[in-house]
């Protein structure tokens, strides 16, 4: 049943793509027109010539067993052997030849996966709290509403050519695990007087000018969610800045209009839509609450491995229903090989309700695992090289693709991610590392924040500085960021470090935290309030690179070449 519900693909989309590609190759349409078209179909140019990144939409982060098998085939047959989970719960495949895109799309279509409107000036993948329907601290399960919203707006011609991308998120409680506060439109679940509904947030965003969202409604009934989404998207289409791409997001339109004037226009538009839908929009009968345990079946048994308890401590969460737990799979930089996609498909068949969720911190959630099956599940994950512990801690870094494939990136953010994870593992017994596990690390290869460095306890964004005739790859530090009930708090910009010394900078910051924190103080809160002079004392000496420093200092992580800047025109961000 879930396979039918989770179907968003269309054969007509693929047929149209094939025809437009034929016309482009025949010279019947120009490169700019084709670029606009393919972006809206999830096909995105890379730093490297003649290959594409393909972004697959995963509404709400939900994937089924047949979908995992299809993604494995795509990774093996069309990409470089692995796929990548993004901070919007999508799956990306890189180095795909344009002429092979049709085969990739046709492999995904039977299982319901689409790339439609995954890039471009469209309504992007609608995200949801990856723990919704599972944990006790939620108002209610928001995943069906995220799916409903995606289905309501997908392929609507009114929203296929917006001034800029438009992002929507659904959080199941005020902790805002889906990051509604940094989306163009956010819905936060609430129950008032026994009625399900949402607090509505609008015009948040990151990039080079981060803004936390405004509260548009303290509460709307759940059945009004689609018309609220439609009204906000219509306003954006009308008032967004089409002349300046750098100032085209909804947050700039609201800033220019003023929030009160935006609300006036929004209310007028909402009333027009309400007149057509006085009772809201009925939720499709195919929608399904996700808080349902799998059918009774044998529980796999195994002896616990020696590292089982450490893994269980950090990777297992209690669920609403006694006897079941949720398992977090800590992926290195969000990557899954074809073999790992297949392994997860088998694991879902054996241990979950047949589904998993991708997360906005580039991990995987396995729902509805019988608690008694945990030792066997852990063994299965380890055998698939998916048994890394310390999920959602400082050991679990988030990163954008960086200079691996992005035209806008200065630095190899993925290589920094690997470096910092290795530093954490090397120093895992260090008292300051143990103390700081409640923190998080997020990395972007440029200031645009696709890796969400602004909202990390410890964030890094790539940049450069000239030292004599050479170019030094470096990272700027953003410290103290987070998202919570009060919205988004953006980290303070406190220093820069050469890329090659970023690991040393991290250790120095953790030692500072350990020695100066207050009782019970979390990493993000400590770096939000600590005297910046203390940070400078630890970090600034690392940035003093002499003009005659060895060549190694002028090499980005992951390469032995002297650094050079290679930027191009970016097509869109995640």
Image (spheres, rainbow, N blue to C red):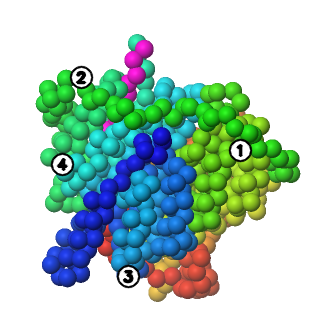
On the rendered image, what quadrant is the C terminus found in?
bottom left
| Residue under the point 46% across and 78% down | 466
Q: Is residue 200 magenta?
A: yes
Mark 4 lies on a secondary structure that is helix
Decide: few, some or many residues near mark 4? Use Cα within 10 Å; few <14, some 14-19, many ≥20. Answer: few
Can you tell which of label 3 and label 2 is closer to the viewer? 2
The residue stretch that appears in magenta: 194-202
Label annotation for residue 314: 1
Q: Secondary structure at mark 3?
A: loop
Q: Which residue is mark 3?
A: 49
Most foreground residue, 32 or 103: 103
Which tag, 4 or 1, sits closer to the chain's start? 4
When asked about the image quadrant of residue 447, the answer is bottom left
Q: CA distance from mark 2 to mark 1?
A: 45 Å
Residue at horizontal 63%, vertical 48%? Answer: 349
Q: What crowding class fits label 2: few (fewer than 14 Cα within 10 Å), some (14-19), or many (20 or more)? A: few
Residue 291 position in % (x across, y down) = 54, 31
Q: Which of the two discs, 3 and 4, labels the residue nearer the N terminus?
A: 3
């Amino acid at each position: 049943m879930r396979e039918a519900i989770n179907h968003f693909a269309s054969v007509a989309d693929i047929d149209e793509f094939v025809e437009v590609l034929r016309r482009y190759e025949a010279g019947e349409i120009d490169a700019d027109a084709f670029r606009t078209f393919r972006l809206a179909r999830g096909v995105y140019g890379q730093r490297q010539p003649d290959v594409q990144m393909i972004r697959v939409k995963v509404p709400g982060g939900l994937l089924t067993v047949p979908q995992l098998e299809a993604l494995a085939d795509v990774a093996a047959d069309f990409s470089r052997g692995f796929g990548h989970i993004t901070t919007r719960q999508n799956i990306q495949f890189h180095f795909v030849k344009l002429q092979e895109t049709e085969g990739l799309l046709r492999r995904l279509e039977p299982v319901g996966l689409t790339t439609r409107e995954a890039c471009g000036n469209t309504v992007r993948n609608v995200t949801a709290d990856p723990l919704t329907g599972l944990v006790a601290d939620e108002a209610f399960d928001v995943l069906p509403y995220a799916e409903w919203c995606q289905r309501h707006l997908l392929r609507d011609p009114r929203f296929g050519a917006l001034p800029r991308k438009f992002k929507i998120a659904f959080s199941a409680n005020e902790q805002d695990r889906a990051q509604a506060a940094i989306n163009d439109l956010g819905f936060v679940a609430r129950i008032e007087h026994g009625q399900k509904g949402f607090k509505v947030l609008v015009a948040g965003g990151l990039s080079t000018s981060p803004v936390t969202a405004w509260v548009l409604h303290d509460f709307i009934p759940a059945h009004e969610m689609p018309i609220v989404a439609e009204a906000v998207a219509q306003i954006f289409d009308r008032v967004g800045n089409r002349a300046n791409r750098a100032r085209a997001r909804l947050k700039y339109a609201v800033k220019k209009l003023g929030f009160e004037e935006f609300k006036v226009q929004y209310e007028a538009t909402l009333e027009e839509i309400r007149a057509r839908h006085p009772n809201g929009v009925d939720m499709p009968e195919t929608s399904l609450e996700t808080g349902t345990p799998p059918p009774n079946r044998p529980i796999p048994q195994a002896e616990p491995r020696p590292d089982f308890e450490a893994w269980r401590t950090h990777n297992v969460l209690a669920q609403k229903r006694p006897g079941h737990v949720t398992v977090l799979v800590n992926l290195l930089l969000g990557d899954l090989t074809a073999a790992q996609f297949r392994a997860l498909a088998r694991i879902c068949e054996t241990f979950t309700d047949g589904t998993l969720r991708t997360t906005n911190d580039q991990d995987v959630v396995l729902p509805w695992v019988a608690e008694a099956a945990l030792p066997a599940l852990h063994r299965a994950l380890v055998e698939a090289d998916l048994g890394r512990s310390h999920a959602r801690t400082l050991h679990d870094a988030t990163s954008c693709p960086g200079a691996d494939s992005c035209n806008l990136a200065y630095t190899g953010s993925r290589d920094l991610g690997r470096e910092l994870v290795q530093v954490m593992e090397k120093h895992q017994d260090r008292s300051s590392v143990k103390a700081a596990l409640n923190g998080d690390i997020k990395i972007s290869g440029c200031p645009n924040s696709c890796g969400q460095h602004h909202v990390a306890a410890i964030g890094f964004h790539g940049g450069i500085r000239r030292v004599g005739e050479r170019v030094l790859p470096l990272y700027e530090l953003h410290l103290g960021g987070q998202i919570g009930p009060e919205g988004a708090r953006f980290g303070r910009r406190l220093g820069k470090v050469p890329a090659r010394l970023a690991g040393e900078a991290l250790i120095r910051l953790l030692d500072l935290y350990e020695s100066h924190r207050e009782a019970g103080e979390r990493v993000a809160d400590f770096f939000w309030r600590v005297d910046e002079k203390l940070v400078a004392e630890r970090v600034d000496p690392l940035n003093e690179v002499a003009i005659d420093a060895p060549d190694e200092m002028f090499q980005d992580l992951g390469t032995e070449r002297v650094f050079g800047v290679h930027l191009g025109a970016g097509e869109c961000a995640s």
